[in-house]
Structures are given as C-alpha cells and as structure tokens.
Image: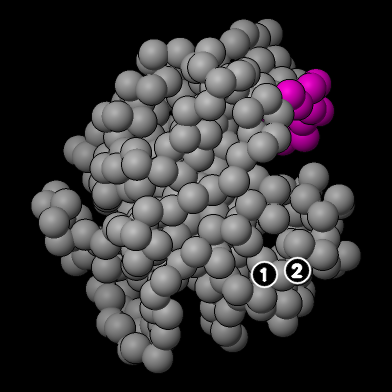
Amino acid sequence: MTTIIFFRKNIVLLIDLHEAKMSINFMEKKLISAVGSIALDWLELPNGLNGDTLGGSLSYFTRSAGVLAPVSVIGVIGSDFPIEGVALFKKYANNIDDLQVKNGNSFRWGGKYHANWEDRTTLYTDLGVFATFRPKMSETNRKSSLVYLGNIHPSLQLDVIKQISSDNTIIVCDTMNLWINTTRNDLDKVLKKIDVLLVNESEAQLLTGREKIEDSAEIIQRMGPINVIIKQGAEGATLFSKDKFFYVPSYTIEGIIDPTGAGDTFGGGLMAALSNDLLLEEGIIWGNAAASFCVEGFGLEGLKNMTEDSFENRVKKLKSNF
Ligand code: AMP
C-alpha cells in the first residue's frame, strides 16, 4: 500500500493510491474551467494514415476530462464548425456558456509526424476566428476551483488568469515549443501565476536549456510553478513537487495509431483526478490512463473507448505495477 503525503495550498492531504475511488456523482466534484483551441485538423502519420479530423487542445481535453468530471469550456468556433464537433462539447462539457460562436472559419491546423512518431512539422496554421478570440468567463466559471490553461497563446492564458475571482483556484497550464520560442515574455508571466506546469521532455529542454528532466524541473520551479509534470511519451510521466518526485510508467498498448492530442488528453485525466479531490500523484496516473486511449485511434476516435469503466480498469492496471 502506498501512502503519499502531499502539501497543497497549505493543506496536508493523505492519499492511499490503492484505495482512491472515483465517485460518479458530479455534484461532489469540483468544477474545471478549461480554455484551449478547438480545431479542424489535417494529420499525416508515419503509418500512412492521413485525413481531416476534429482536433484542438480543448476538444481532446473535454472528451477526456468530461467523462469523469464537470468541465466548463472557454473557446471559440467558426460558423463552419461541424455539427459532430458541437455535439462532442454538448455531450462532454457540463457547461458551454463560454463557448463563443463567431462568423468565419474555425481554427485549422495541419501536422505531419516524422518517422520517430514524436517530432512533427506544422504544415499550416490558419487562425480564422481564433485570431480575434478574447476569452470571456461567466461568473460561475470565474469562481471555479480548478482552471486548465490548454495549449494556446500565453496572452490568452493570461486573459483567463486575470478573470479568475477566487484566491484558491488551482491553475494547471500546458504549453508548446511555438510559445517557448516566440512569446517568452508572456509565457514567463503565465509561469509566475500557475500551480502546475505540464510539458513534454523537449519543451522542458527548450524552456531551460537543460538535458535532464530533474534539472529542467528545478529551473522551471524557480520560474513559478511549484509543481512540474514532465510527460515522457511512451515512457510515462514524472511529477516534480518541491523536492519530491513521482514517476508513473505509461499504460502499455498494442500499437500506436496517432499521438495527436495525447498531451491534452493527459491534462484531462489529471484535472479529473483533482476534481475528484485526489492528488497530483493520482492525477498523473489518471493522465497516463486517459492518454493511452487517445493514441489508440486517429484523431479523437481512440477516445470513443474511454468510458468510466474502461478508464477505471486501466487506472487499476497501472497501479498494479507499483
Ligand atoms: P498535442 O498533440 O497534445 O500537442 O495537441 C494537438 C492539437 O493541438 C491539435 O489538435 C491542434 O489542433 C492543436 N494545435 C496545434 N498547434 C496549435 C496552436 N498553435 N495553438 C493552439 N492549438 C494548436
């Protein structure tokens, strides 16, 4: 039995990882307000698969977290956004009051993966209605206990941070190479305001100039967030929290079909755990379990298999490795 003591916002919490139970009553869960991109993607994969699909950081996040926790979405779609996409948000979001619908084209992104399945080249980015997007949060969402800043321009992440009206809100943030390279000043401001940063290994290296994840994590902690989660792809993920670390291996799957959105899906699992009053350690287990569904299908297809039951089974299996 693994008991972990964890300090969060001056509260000492105890968790037994083997006993932590999911509760399916949404009334007992903390509200997550999440901002991110909602996109029409074009994907080209090393296995020869390519095509159009619904995407964006907020779509993957909502599909994953929304099975397990109440999510309020903050985003924008254009008048061309397909009905199936709207249906996804209606089904998996608890609240779409802050989902803006604007005249014009939805955000479009094209990506081509390299043979190693990890690196990818952006083929195009057409901002469409995203170019003039300004997040606007309802009173309820401004008070939410948890805020997830999905991968979007850091100035938009800052817009959301400024609207949060509770001092106790836990803010978790994701970012990408593009923003580390091009909008460092805004990103530095975001880092000072957040509780948890989620990055993958190459983003951590780019942000800090350090090769080893433990060195990168220490430097990032000095930039602001006391908790840093480094996603290591097929290897799993490691949480660095003050002077402690906690590593979780990935859930073993038969074969990867498409890695797009795995990071956002991981974020969804993580935030769902926090919504259920569980700790970041449990959160990275949930994140790994959720991401394993994502990579099993093209675009959002793999997540069709993520139900409460199938998710709980994968969480149990991951824990049996400890
Ligand atoms: P991930 O694989 O976790 O990095 O997420 C992939 C998703 O990020 C895709 O569905 C894209 O639509 C979205 N995306 C790619 N580039 C950007 C960008 N510059 N801003 C916001 N979202 C993006």
Q: Gap in Å between the C-alphas at discs 1 and 2?
A: 5 Å
Range of magenta residues: 114-126
Q: Which residue is mark 2?
A: 188
Question: x, y percentage for residue 168?
Answer: 39, 78
Q: Nearer the viewer, residue 53 or 250?
A: 53
Q: Secondary structure beneath disc 1?
A: helix
- The quadrant holding residue 301 is top left
What residue is at 41 percent from the left and 43 percent from the top? 98
Query: Compared to 130, does 191 lie above or below?
Result: below
Residue 293, position as x, y percentages in the image: 41, 32
- Taking the spot 33% from the left edge, 89% from the top edge, the residue there is 12
Q: Position of residue 83 (x, y in %)?
A: 39, 13
Asked if the stretch drawn in magenta spans residue 121, the answer is yes
Name the quadrant of the N terminus.
bottom left
Classify mark 2 as within 8 Å of ligand 1 or not, answering yes or no: no
Q: Are marks 1 and 2 in contact (CB under 8 Å)?
A: yes
Mark 1 lies within 8 Å of ligand 1 (Cβ measured): no
214 falls in the magenta region = no
Relative to 150, is 112 on the left or the right?
right
Label at residue 191: 1
Q: Amino acid at mark 1?
A: Leu
Residue 107 horizontal/vertical position (percent): 63, 26
